[in-house]
């Protein structure tokens, strides 16, 4: 799932590719992904792209006063095509194509490029919105502060943790209404960098721990953005994967201490952590397993 650093890099890459081009039309292939009806998708035809930005994990293509907003969810991605295919795409259960944004050709070309929005797998959760203001998308209106913004200082983080009481850090970091853009992967990475248990209650951090967590959030995300910037969409997934320390690395060696990375599974996700770095060497109880054993 793309999170803040990948979506930021996508926004920068797409901004360069799309800016000052006209949208010829948007072909929606998987109708279930389109979450709005007013303005209609056809209102984007002829609109000139002003730029592409990010709100949390949402991508926002602004064109002539309208916004085409995308949430790539778990398995969504974008693919750039230098030349749009001749015929409009047809819905097919086998194709991952959810929508295609056809763009105007350069002055010296006959055929314009296209941006394909795809979703792999069967769990359809990719979302597209056409809105007049980004905040018309409920998920954007509810976003907490952006952790890389200048005004995200240590006091902002302290308040967020305080407000969440005894809720576990893992869940607090992932909740988009607390902090925008951190998902399952980077919450694992931040907690590993901060050497904290994912289950530590948010309101119990000392001032030293608060500082450590703040620094981990800024450095883990900041470094990932720096590594991702300038990469094309096709390169971003590999770049993310090769730099994760614990997330998705169950059974492998922690790059810091060499201990084996462990996992705790939940109904629809799992977290990874290093016992030596994060939990005083003690493995966390796998809640799913302990429930079964009761
Ligand atoms: Zn370790």
Image (spheres, helix red, strand yellow):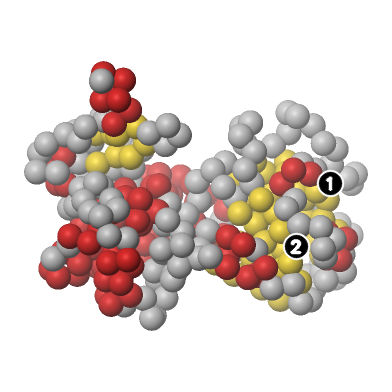
Left or right: residue 131 versus residue 120 is: right
Q: Residues within 10 Å of mark 2 (few under 14, many from 20)?
A: many
Image quarter of the C terminus: top left
| Tags 1 and 2 touching, CB below 8 Å | no
- Could you tell me which residue is drawn at 16 percent across and 47 percent down? 278
The quarter of the picture where residue 288 lies is top left
Q: How far is the residue under mark 1 from the one under mark 2?
A: 24 Å
What is the x, y in percent for residue 248?
36, 38
Residue 147 drawn above or below residue 262: below
Q: Which mark is residue 38?
A: none
Label 1 sits on residue: 85
Foreground residue, 81 or 204?
204
What is the x, y in percent for residue 279?
14, 44
- Taking the view exactly as shown, the residue that stands out farthest to the top is 293
Label 2 sits on residue: 130
The quarter of the picture where residue 70 lies is bottom right
Q: Residues within 10 Å of mark 1 (few under 14, many from 20)?
A: few
What is the x, y in percent for residue 224?
38, 59
Residue 37 drawn above or below residue 108: above
- Could you tell me which residue is drawn at 29 percent across and 39 percent down? 272
């Amino acid at each position: 799932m793309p999170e803040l650093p990948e979506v930021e890099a996508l926004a920068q890459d797409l901004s360069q590719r799309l800016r000052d081009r006209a949208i010829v039309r948007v072909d929606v292939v998987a109708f279930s992904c389109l979450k709005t009806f007013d303005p209609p998708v056809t209102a984007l035809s002829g609109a000139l792209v002003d730029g592409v930005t990010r709100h949390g994990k949402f991508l926002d293509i602004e064109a002539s006063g309208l916004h085409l907003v995308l949430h790539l969810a778990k398995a969504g991605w974008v693919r750039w095509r230098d030349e749009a295919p001749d015929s409009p795409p047809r819905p097919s259960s086998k194709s991952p194509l959810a929508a295609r944004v056809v763009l105007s050709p350069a002055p010296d070309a006959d055929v314009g490029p296209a941006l394909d929005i795809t979703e792999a797998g069967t769990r359809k959760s990719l979302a597209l919105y056409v809105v007049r203001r980004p905040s018309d998308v409920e998920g954007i209106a509810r976003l907490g502060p952006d952790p890389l913004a200048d005004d995200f200082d240590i006091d902002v983080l302290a308040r967020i943790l305080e407000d969440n009481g005894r809720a576990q850090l893992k869940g607090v970091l992932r909740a988009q209404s607390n902090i925008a853009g951190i998902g399952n992967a980077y919450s694992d990475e931040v907690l590993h960098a901060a050497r904290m248990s994912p289950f530590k209650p948010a309101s119990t951090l000392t001032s030293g721990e608060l500082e450590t967590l703040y620094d981990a959030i800024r450095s883990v995300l900041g470094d990932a953005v720096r590594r991702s910037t300038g990469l094309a969409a096709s390169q971003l997934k590999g770049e993310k994967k090769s730099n994760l320390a614990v997330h998705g690395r169950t059974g492998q060696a922690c790059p810091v201490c060499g201990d084996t990375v462990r996992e705790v599974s939940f109904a629809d996700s799992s977290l990874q952590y290093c016992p030596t770095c994060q939990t005083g060497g003690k493995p966390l109880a796998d809640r799913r397993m302990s429930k079964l054993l009761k």
